[in-house]
Amino acid sequence: MSLKFFTNREVAEKVRRIELPFNAYGLDPYGVSQDYLAVFYSLLLPLYRDYFTVRTHGIENIPAQGRAMVVGNHSGGLPVDGAMVLASLFAEMDPPRLAQGMVEKFAQSLPFLSHWFSRVGQFAGLPEHAERLLNDDRLLMVFPEGVRGVGKLFKDRYKLERFGTGFIRLALATNTPVIPMAFIGGEEALPTAFHLKKMAKLIGVPYIPVPPYLLPLPMPVHCEIYYGEPMYFSGNGNEEDRVINGYVEQVKERISELIEQGRVERRSVFGGLRPKPRIDNDAVRFDP
């Protein structure tokens, strides 16, 4: 079946406005595909708009062009946060921007998914991949908590786990601004009560989240995304650990502040204000 069957026409037209060096076949030098992106966003936008009713704040802090690193909290058992961040940068920016994330290495071994990840710009989380993307002035999406964050239990909701330090060394080495981000709602979308660790080990994944209602599918909770002002740090990436750790703590503190702001300002867990319409047609409708 053709990919066009799953593609919203207006979404596909907006994909073509993403400022990446696509060739005549709709591929960029990394193998990112316009056709796959069109399907990807056609599926994501109804979730963004109607299922999770996402409201985005601070989109003006995302540069229209040039390298930048969006760094945020990770949560929710399944990576709802990453998917909705990708959707927000597409839906709320014109021209849109593609955020490229560093996928956990185990995901690259999963049939079908690994191919799709690469076609929509999400690559294995290797430092050399991230450095090359930033040197090409791409927008990078980073979750320094890694699987520690997305695998946390509901009782530990909105508590930040330990941050890795590699993102700061990378930002310094490539002279990249860090844009702190908070995602509100992932904790409630899939409230993890416990993990099926033995089964997870058998299929080669870090964990299998189990919510109180047993079926590991996210609920339609209202989510919010907060993008803070860019943070700039001086150095070349070879600084002593104490300097790097100090920078990491500054970013972590700012994300904590955005999380608290979001939790205070969030009006309800289920339902919320409908985001400003961006795209409107029969397949993906955004009514005022």
Image: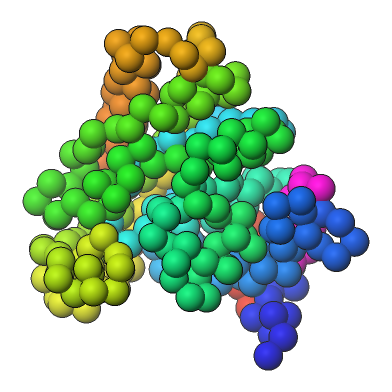
For residue 22, say whether it is visible: yes
In terms of depth relative to the viewer, which is nearer, 105 or 24? Answer: 105
Residue 207, position in %: x, y? 23, 63
- Residue at 46% across / 22% down in the picture? 169
User: Coloring scheme of the render?
Assistant: rainbow
Residue 278, position in %: x, y? 64, 57
Quick check: is 13 in the magenta stretch? yes
Quick check: is 18 in the magenta stretch? yes
Q: Where is 183 relative to 36, above or below?
A: above
Residue range (magenta) = 12-21
> How many badges with numbers are in the image?
0
- Residue at 26% across / 41% down in the picture? 263
Q: Residue furthest right?
A: 24
Magenta stretch prevailing secondary structure: loop
Residue 257, position in %: x, y? 29, 27
Q: Where is 151 relative to 93, above or below?
A: below
Q: Where is 218 relative to 175, above or below?
A: below
- Residue at 64% across / 36% down in the picture? 132
Horizontal side of residue 287 vs 47, given as left or right: right
For residue 261, say whether it is visible: no
